[in-house]
Image: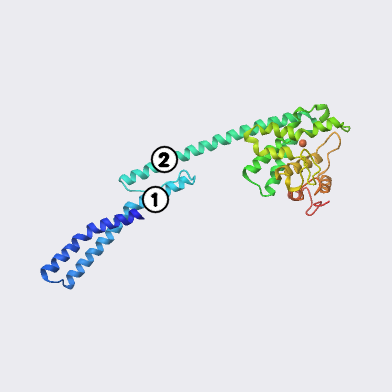
Amino acid sequence: MRVYRTLLGIVLLASAAPTVLLGVLLARERGGLDAVAIAAIGASAGLAAALSGLAARRITRPISQCVRGALEIARGRFGHQVRVTARNEIGDLAYTFNHMSRELASYDAENRRLIAALERGYLETIRSLASAIDAKDPYTRGHAERVAALAVELGRELGLSGERLAALEYAGLLHDVGKIGIPDAILAKASPLTREEMALVQAHPRIGAEIVGGVAFLAGAVPAIRGHHERWDGDGYPDRLAGEAIPLAARIVSAADTWDACTSERPYQRALAPSEAARVVATLRGTQLDPTVHGALMAILRRRGILEPGASSAA
Ligand SMILES: [Fe+2]
């Protein structure tokens, strides 16, 4: 607007000045001006003002469009085009701006494609690692994938999005990565574990968090990996956290892990039918499981048609 006002002033002064000067000279020579002369001078000055406005607008409008376009790009809306048809230096500026904007959009799309490919690569590597851990125990084959899928669904149900859902997926896949050092015989043991064996098994969330903690890309998954065996009542491990002191992602992975454990064949139990598993899980609400996360799990099961509306939502 400042450029517009400056231009308007300059053009107006340049175009109206001769008319005003002519009026002054005429008035001196004739000792005054008649109505026709005043009307002619007024009309001329008015026309000069209108043309000045038009000229100033014609110059500043394309500049304003370029400025608005630059702001759109600054906001990350690459590819924004300005509509300037002027065949002068300003038109050249707009043409260059549009070209730059298209190039930026193209680089942005390429970057997004590369990042997506990189993330897919990471995910595939993590999946391979998770299935290698699952393969140690014939009873847990596919467990990590199912826990990851259910954890993401629970996260969505609880209103999480973006990076928090991605962290849930990684945590679901890697929650038992710390079992990598536990002998297969202990993992597959159907009889009660000895004190030493139990200590070894209970170290897996801490070991898993240490393994994953060294990978910057997986930093968001660490709290859930470390905390997936904590209990809402504080009787879990390794840190004996309780209630909301347990990270939400850990409470979510814990619920998904528990559900999958109930509905899968294990050395110490047969796979429960979904309605039976829902009854078992309901008994854990408020003791092992966060009541809110349990509620979200029930909502998902009802939506899947596994549970009747209103069934088994409480112990
Ligand atoms: Fe675990």
| Ligand 1: image quarter | top right
Element at label 2: helix
Where is residue 284 shown, x and y percent of the image?
Answer: 82, 46
Q: Residue furthest bottom?
A: 35
Residue at 54% x, 38% y: name it: 112
Look at the picture and state if 9 lies above or below 246.
below
Quarter of the image that includes the N terminus: bottom left
The location of residue 174, given as percent across then percent down, is 71, 34
At x 72%, y 33%, the residue is 208
Q: Is residue 64 visible?
A: yes
Q: Residue furthest right?
A: 191
Is residue 18 depicted above or below 221 in this figure?
below
For badge 2, the amino acid type reads: Met
Please give the label number shown on residue 65: 1
Helix, strand or loop at label 1? It is helix
Q: Could you give the CA–CA distance between mark 1 and mark 2, rounded to whole angstroms?
A: 15 Å
Q: Using the rendered view, name the quadrant where residue 40 is placed.
A: bottom left
Q: Position of residue 176 (x, y in %)?
A: 74, 34
**Callout count:** 2
Q: Locate residue 4 relative to residue 225 in the image: left or right.
A: left
Residue 15 appears left or right of 169:
left
The residue lying toward the viewer, choosing from 109 and 66, is: 66
Q: In the figure, 313 relative to 256: above or below?
A: below
The numbered mark, 1 or 2, whose residue comes first in the sequence reads: 1
Residue ID for mark 2 = 100
Which amino acid, by three-letter code, is at mark 1? Gln
